[in-house]
């Protein structure tokens, strides 16, 4: 998988025209339902004893467009038939007409002459229901007050009692996201890197030791490596000048050191990325789009994800990793920040995202689509220690050049050419194991190798001197050999 580092500029998304909203009255469903019997006189919605109307189904028109309702000025329906039940309403205005509205032509709140109230059938039943409802309502209110009074003898008002309730204990346990963030944030910094040409960017880092070493991504500090300027700002606002101790372009790891570092630095606890499982909770801290001290959460979506990343510039060389994939929101500015587990241990360094083809919010920069990648901390820890010790990275190697093209069914060792005179290093690990140009490596230990970048990323999770099992194909036959990894110092 090829991804971009988080600062790549991409074209903005095209603007889509608004979709016209269909007028409810124009829906063909608006006349799909007809009254099966003679319509009853209107009854106020929510009256006691009157059933509520059926909710509209998804296939029907919205609730604000009554299906089959007559238009203004039209008859409400066919006349009553002889002997139909219930009998038709008397011509007098029903007793509930003072609610206004409907098709009477009388506006809400208007006065008019009251007509004699009907004495038979439906009108009497409706009135009885109203009385019963009022009695029941009074009884329910009395019972409710009595129960409240029995539970609180200090007041005669349930409103006063409710107002005296407190908001509860806001103490947050150490295992909660808030608890982890509160502990980790003081040990993270927002890094501003500026090159001698005035160009630069913003990223994130975290405290690695009490001597003032900060771990971050190589691409965060790359602009400031040769005569540039670096600053690191803590969440409390304290800002320190810093310098690059060492950087590893292939690993995309760098270490900087604070000048005049404070004596109370608290390094973050490092976890074990080999023990991480898919589905484990993750917490990412960074400065997305310059918004320092931002905390996002997610899970581990996948492990050992082969990733080749770069910033997209012509001069940029790719970095390779067998990454932890997370759906925690990671955006430009999160680079170099810690990816934590649910206990607050660092399990990775946020490094790259799989971006969509267009930017968001008019910025021209792509943002998170839930595909973020972090360098496993076991690898990053080894690299950081080497950089602090010697200032240069050390890479494991097999002593053979492989093609970076897709579709080879594995990592193919390059053929001899003018560009690659010696694809298999004489006396190197691959040569000692019997590998030759044209061989296709399909496995390293139990990990399937599907391309050159995948092989490189997997090799770099190991240290020089480690023994690995290499499975390769030659002339249609598969063979497995043991190989002892060599070493290479520095970027080349």
Image: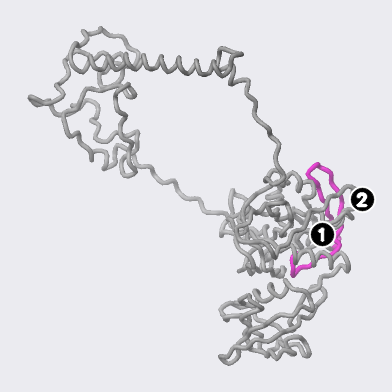
Residue 483 belongs to magenta span: no
Q: Position of residue 37 (x, y in %)?
A: 16, 31
Quadrant containing the N terminus in the rendered view: bottom right
Query: Label 2, on which residue?
Result: 260
Q: Quadrant of the C terminus?
A: bottom right
Q: How are the residues colored?
A: one colour
Q: Which residue is mark 1?
A: 224
Q: Can residue 119 be seen here?
A: yes
Answer with mark 1 or mark 2, whichever residue precedes in sequence.
Answer: 1
Count residues near mark 1 (Cα–Cα under 10 Å), then give few for <14, some for 14-19, many for 20+. many
Give the magenta-colored segment's residue range. 226-252
Residue lying furthest left in this view?
82
Tell me if 482 is positioned left or right of 369 in this view. right
Q: Nearer the viewer, residue 58 or 192?
A: 58
Give the SS element for disc 1: helix
Give the number of the mark in front: 1 or 2: 2
Residue at (36% x, 14% y) in the render = 135
Compare residues 214 and 354 and report the one nearer the observer: 214
Q: 288 above or below 466?
A: above
Instruction: Please state the horizontal and vertical placement of residue 116, each as a whole percent of the image.
Output: 21, 7
């Amino acid at each position: 998988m090829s991804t971009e580092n988080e600062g790549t500029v991409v074209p903005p998304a095209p603007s889509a025209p608004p979709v016209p909203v269909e007028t409810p009255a124009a829906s063909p469903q608006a006349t799909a339902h007809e009254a099966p019997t003679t319509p009853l006189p209107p009854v106020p919605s929510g009256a006691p004893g009157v059933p509520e109307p059926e909710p509209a189904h998804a296939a029907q028109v919205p609730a604000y467009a009554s299906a089959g309702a007559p238009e203004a000025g039209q008859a409400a329906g066919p006349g009553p038939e002889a002997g139909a039940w219930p009998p038709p309403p008397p011509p007098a205005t029903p007793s509930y007409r003072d609610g206004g509205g409907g098709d009477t032509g009388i506006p809400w709140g208007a006065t008019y002459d009251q007509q004699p109230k009907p004495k038979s059938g439906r009108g009497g039943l409706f009135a009885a229901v109203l009385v019963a409802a009022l009695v029941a309502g009074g009884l329910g209110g009395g019972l409710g007050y009595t129960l409240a009074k029995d539970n609180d003898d200090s007041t005669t008002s349930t409103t006063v009692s409710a107002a005296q309730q407190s908001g509860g204990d806001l103490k947050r346990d150490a295992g909660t996201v808030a608890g982890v963030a509160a502990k980790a944030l003081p040990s993270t910094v927002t890094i501003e890197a500026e090159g001698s040409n005035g160009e630069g960017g913003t990223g994130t880092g975290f405290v690695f030791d009490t001597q003032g070493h900060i771990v971050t991504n190589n691409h965060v500090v790359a602009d400031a490596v040769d005569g540039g300027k670096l600053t690191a700002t803590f969440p409390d606002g304290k800002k320190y000048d810093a310098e690059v101790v060492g950087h590893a372009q292939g690993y995309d790891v760098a270490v900087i050191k604070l000048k005049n570092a404070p004596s109370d630095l608290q390094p973050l606890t490092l976890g074990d990325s080999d023990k991480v499982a898919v589905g484990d909770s993750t917490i990412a801290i960074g400065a997305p789009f310059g918004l320092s001290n931002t905390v996002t959460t997610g899970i581990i979506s996948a492990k050992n994800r082969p990733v080749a990343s770069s910033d997209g510039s012509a001069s940029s060389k790719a970095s390779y990793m067998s990454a932890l994939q997370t759906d925690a929101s990671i955006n430009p500015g999160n680079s170099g920040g810690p990816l934590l587990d649910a206990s607050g241990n660092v399990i990775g360094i946020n490094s790259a995202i799989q971006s969509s083809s267009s930017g968001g919010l008019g910025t021209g920069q792509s943002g998170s689509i839930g595909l973020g990648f972090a360098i496993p901390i076991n690898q990053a820890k080894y690299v950081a220690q080497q950089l602090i010790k010697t200032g240069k990275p050390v890479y494991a190697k097999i002593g053979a050049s492989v093609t970076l093209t897709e579709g080879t069914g594995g990592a193919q060792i390059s053929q001899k050419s003018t560009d690659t005179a010696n694809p298999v290093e004489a006396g190197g690990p691959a040569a000692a194991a019997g590998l030759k140009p044209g061989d296709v490596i399909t496995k390293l230990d139990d990990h399937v190798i599907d391309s050159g970048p995948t092989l490189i990323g997997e090799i770099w999770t190991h240290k020089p001197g480690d023994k690995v099992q290499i499975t390769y194909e030659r002339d249609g036959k598969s063979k497995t050999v043991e190989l002892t990894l060599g070493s290479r110092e520095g970027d080349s």
